[in-house]
Amino acid sequence: MIDDTLLEAEDKMDKAVEVAKEDLAAIRTGRANPAMFAKVMVEYYGAATPLQQLASVQAPEARTVLVSPFDRSILGSVERALRDSDLGVNPSNDGNVIRLQLPELTQERRRDYVKLARTKGEDGKITVRGLRRRAKEELDRIVRDGEAGEDEVGRAEKELERLTKVHVDAIDDMLKRKESDLLDV
């Protein structure tokens, strides 16, 4: 019972770290990165569909991105979704592919992205701490119901704290790397 609680908490914490990693990857640094477009949703036959399911996204140069839809009939929808996204790009459509020229990042914009990255990192850490709280409540219930002794649960709580620290530190490390990427000119 205790092991199940710890395994479930660890699994969910791993997922929270993975979500934080994806969120941080979507924030633009100086170089064009196809991961920036992971959250762009395109209206496709009445359903919001992720861009990466409808097109290939390539970054041949530092500030240029090519989006090649698999179905040419959705070029207009893809172009509209890119224009409406929060990436600050102006797509140009040549009938086959969509070209995006990413503007040079100003110092002010870099600071805004650092704030955004910190917010995303903090959201990930809050999620991990919430998972720790739920697992701790479950461990307390196990002691209350007499399913395990206090010594066993005490060891499990120490393990839970260790898991929490490992996952929060992983998010902090990702955040530091992202901040240094953003602030390098």
Image (cartoon, helix red, strand yellow):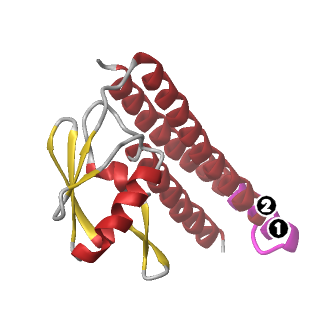
Residue occupied by mark 2: 137
At 61% across and 51% down in the image, what residue appears? 128
At 42% across and 43% down in the image, what residue appears? 87
For residue 109, above or below residue 126: above
Q: Which mark is residue 10?
A: none
At 54% across and 57% down in the image, what residue appears? 13
| Most frequent secondary structure within the magenta stretch | helix
Q: Residue farthest to the bottom?
A: 45
Which amino acid does the dot numbered 2 rest on?
A: Glu
For residue 19, above or below residue 8: above
Q: Is residue 37 magenta?
A: no
Foreground residue among 86 and 30 = 86
Q: The residue tagged with tag 1: helix, strand or loop?
A: helix
At 47% across and 52% down in the image, what residue appears? 84
Q: Looking at the rendering, in which quadrant would you find the C terminus? A: top left
Q: In the rendering, at what x and y percent does residue 12 appear?
A: 55, 63
**Left or right of 165 in this view: 94:** left
**Left or right of 35 in this view: 40:** right
Task: Please say if the residues under marks 1 and 2 sit with CB atoms less than 8 Å apart.
Answer: yes
Could you tell me how far apart the alpha carbons at marks 1 and 2 are, in whole angstroms?
A: 6 Å
Question: In this view of the protein, can residue 4 be seen by the observer?
Answer: yes
State which mark lies toward you, 1 or 2. 2
Q: Residue 141 carries which label?
A: 1
Q: What stretch is highlighted in magenta?
A: 139-154
Q: In the rendering, at what x and y percent does residue 167 appear?
A: 51, 46
Q: In the rendering, at what x and y percent does residue 142 appear?
A: 78, 69
Which amino acid does the dot numbered 1 rest on?
A: Arg
